[in-house]
């Protein structure tokens, strides 16, 4: 079954009472038992809910996993996965990951005794050399946020498997429409479903997708025990949005390619980061593990010619806002916004500058978006 068909048809037809075409919202905190120890599959919504189960089945099918846990936020999904480990365990991850992930790792889990190595994961030797006897997980974010660096998933998995190390991939930027890390050997995939899977900027959520049943059992136990499962209404919103994932991702990508090419040729732009451009330094790897380039790009503004605030204020169709993946175009400055919690030293190490601009392309007309950027870039 094609992914566009899966996104529409997986997780529906659960209402056998009234045959509702759309999955109902089971807005209940608890379910009654027929007798002690006998119920119809659900006892308490934190542990399980039919609406959330429909979404979980959908996302698992899209990613090719055995099961999925839908969580309250993307950070909740990441937190649940890290609880597979214990203080004293070592985790390898990229030095250019999402700021919120970095904050959780460095400012919350590290003081609790978890050990992290933030390395350039494009350099496989650095990944391999970072492995110790205490390494229990390698965290992959590809393409990276915000500079769109690509990590060789299969190569990292090969390093991990030799030492029986868990691998986890954050697939938020591309979605399963353009990349399927489980097919490349990863153990778990995480998402901020707030972004492309929902696609309408009207809900926050996350997901963990499992490659096998052992991981599923532990993961679902942790999500329940930690109390980070998603509410039925929020799950319903994501399930509604995910049905249009295919056409949305195509539109996002088309706009991103058009805008990236425009920016690359503009005199007031120093550099553009987008996997679909010929100038991207990893074209072979892009072709190897991705079926598309996605709707995200970043660029370096020449602030000697155009002030950052002036540029942002002149834009009409790009909202200055964090987050990404919605039908509307968003723009932001990672140094001061999405990645600010990393601090100057880590930001510089990641390659992010004060002039870095991150763009989430919506599904508007490309001509309108380019015209808007053009007038704003004049300063």
Image (tube, grey):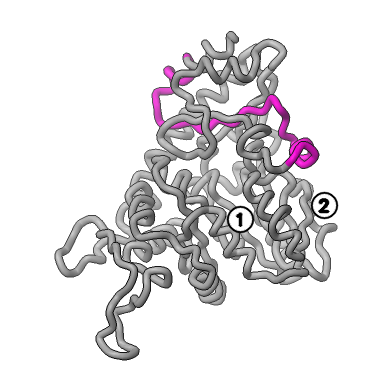
Image coords of residue 326 (percent x, y) = 43, 38
In this rendering, position of residue 119 left or right of residue 27: right
The residue at which mark 2 appears reads as: 126
- Residue 235, numbered label: none
Image: magenta residue range:
343-371
Classify mark 1: helix, strand or loop: strand
In this rendering, position of residue 199 left or right of residue 175: left
Counting labels gives: 2
The residue at which mark 1 appears reads as: 169
| Residue 159 in magenta stretch | no
The residue drawn where x is 52% and y is 23% is 259
Q: Is residue 54 above or below residue 358?
A: below
**Residue 229 in sight here:** yes
Q: Is residue 112 above or below residue 244?
A: below
Q: Image quarter for residue 252?
A: top left
> Circle 1: is it few (<14), some (14-19), or many (20+) Cα within 10 Å?
many
| Residue 344 in magenta stretch | yes
The residue drawn where x is 65% and y is 15% is 307
First-in-chain label (1 vs 2): 2
**Residue 285 in sight here:** no
Q: Is residue 42 above or below residue 371?
A: below
Image coords of residue 315 (percent x, y) = 50, 18
Residue reaching furthest to the bottom: 36
The residue drawn where x is 20% and y is 57% is 21
Q: Is residue 263 above or below residue 151?
A: above
């Amino acid at each position: 079954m094609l992914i566009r068909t899966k996104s529409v048809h997986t997780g529906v037809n659960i209402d056998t009472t009234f045959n509702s075409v759309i999955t109902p919202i089971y807005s209940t905190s608890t379910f009654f038992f027929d007798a002690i120890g006998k119920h119809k599959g659900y006892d308490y919504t934190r542990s399980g809910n039919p609406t959330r189960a429909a979404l979980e089945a959908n996302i698992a099918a899209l990613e090719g996993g055995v099961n999925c846990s839908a969580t309250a936020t993307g950070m909740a999904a990441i937190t649940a996965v890290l609880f597979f480990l214990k203080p004293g365990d070592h985790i390898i991850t990229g030095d250019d990951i999402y700021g919120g992930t970095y904050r959780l790792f460095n400012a919350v889990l590290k003081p609790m005794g978890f050990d992290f190595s933030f390395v350039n994961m494009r350099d496989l030797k650095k990944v391999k050399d970072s492995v110790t006897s205490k390494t229990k997980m390698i965290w992959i974010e590809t393409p990276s946020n915000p500079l769109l660096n690509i990590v060789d998933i299969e190569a990292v998995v090969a390093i991990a498997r030799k030492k029986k190390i868990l691998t986890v991939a954050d697939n938020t930027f591309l979605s399963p429409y353009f990349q399927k890390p489980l097919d490349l050997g990863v153990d778990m995939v995480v998402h901020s479903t707030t972004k492309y899977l929902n696609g309408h900027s009207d809900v926050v959520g996350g997901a963990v997708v499992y490659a096998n049943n052992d991981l599923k059992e532990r993961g679902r136990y942790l999500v329940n025990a930690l109390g980070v499962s998603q509410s039925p209404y929020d799950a319903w919103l994501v399930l509604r949005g995910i049905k249009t994932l295919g056409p949305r991702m195509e539109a996002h990508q088309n706009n991103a390619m058009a805008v990236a090419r425009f920016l690359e040729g503009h005199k007031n732009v120093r550099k553009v980061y987008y996997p679909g451009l010929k100038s991207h330094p990893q074209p072979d790897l892009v072709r190897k593990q991705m079926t598309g380039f996605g709707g995200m790009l970043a660029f370096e503004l020449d602030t000697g010619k155009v002030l950052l605030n002036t540029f942002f204020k002149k834009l009409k169709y790009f909202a200055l806002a964090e987050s990404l993946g919605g039908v509307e175009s968003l723009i932001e400055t990672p140094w001061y916004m999405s990645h600010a919690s990393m601090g100057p030293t880590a930001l510089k190490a990641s390659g992010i500058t004060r002039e870095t601009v991150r763009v989430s392309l919506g599904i508007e007309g490309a001509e309108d978006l380019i015209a808007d950027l053009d007038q704003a870039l004049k300063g």
